Image: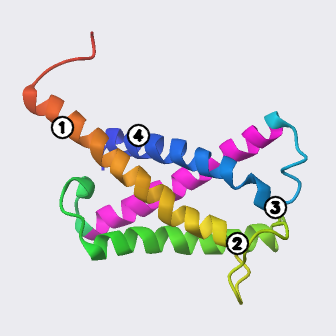
Amino acid sequence: MTIGSCFFNLVCQLFAAFFWEMIQVPFFTGMMEASHGAVVWLCTRAAIGDANIALFAYGIAAAATKDGFWIQGRWRRHVLGVYFATGLLITIVFEAWATGAGQRWSYNDSMPLLPFIGTGIAPLVQWIIVPTVSLFGLRWLYRGWLDLRRQGGDYSRQ
């Protein structure tokens, strides 16, 4: 992976994750009572964490395919499986720690939970919807960047 591909990946994930974090605010204890600034700050931090998980999962998928631009080719099930499994596993482990021993946050009564594990469903659904949207956005960004490189144009000075 190049620095540019990492940057594009982080940008796509960050914006989509922040949007999702703001949507799921009602499922967490104390968030509805918190000030707007506090909620924005907490959601920004969570989105940065989510984007880093996504970048790591992308890197694992890239290592599995030996191709940092795997997103530009045909999306093979096993590559997507590696990508999503990595993100879901990290999410489940981190959510279990954060709502348990880490005491970082807690779910309110409206959060549906996974049986036996106790992880909230919203963070897991997030790891299906947000990365899917982000992958399509990332693919679109890469195509534009690759088209510019193929044309040999330098549009940085316009």
Image quarter of the C terminus: top left
Secondary-structure class at tag 3: loop
Over which residues does the magenta segment extend? Answer: 38-64
**Nearest-to-viewer mark from 4 and 3:** 3
Overall secondary structure of the magenta section = helix
Q: Position of residue 124 (x, y in %)?
A: 59, 69
Quarter of the image where one finds residue 118 = bottom right
Question: Tag 4: residue type?
Answer: Phe
Above or below, 93 against 75 in this view is below
> Do the residues under discs 1 and 2 have CB atoms within 8 angstroms?
no
Question: Tag 3: residue type?
Answer: Trp
- Res 48 seen here: no
- In primary-sequence order, the first of circles 1 and 4 is 4
Q: Name the residue under label 1.
A: 146
Q: Residue placed at 81% from the left, 36% from the top?
A: 36
**Nearest-to-viewer mark from 2 and 3:** 2
> Do the residues under discs 4 and 3 have CB atoms within 8 angstroms?
no
Question: Tag 2: residue type?
Answer: Gly
Question: Tag 1: residue type?
Answer: Leu
- Residue 47: within the magenta? yes
Q: Name the residue under label 4.
A: 7
Dot 3: within a 10 Å radius of its alpha carbon, few (fewer than 14), some, or many (20 or more) residues?
some
Q: In this view, does 15 lie to the left or right of 137?
A: right
Dot 2: within a 10 Å radius of its alpha carbon, few (fewer than 14), some, or many (20 or more) residues?
many
Q: Residue placed at 71% from the left, 90% from the top?
A: 116
**Nearest-to-viewer mark from 1 and 4:** 1
Q: Name the residue under label 3.
A: 105
Q: Where is residue 144 in the image (x, y as percent from the top left)?
A: 23, 35
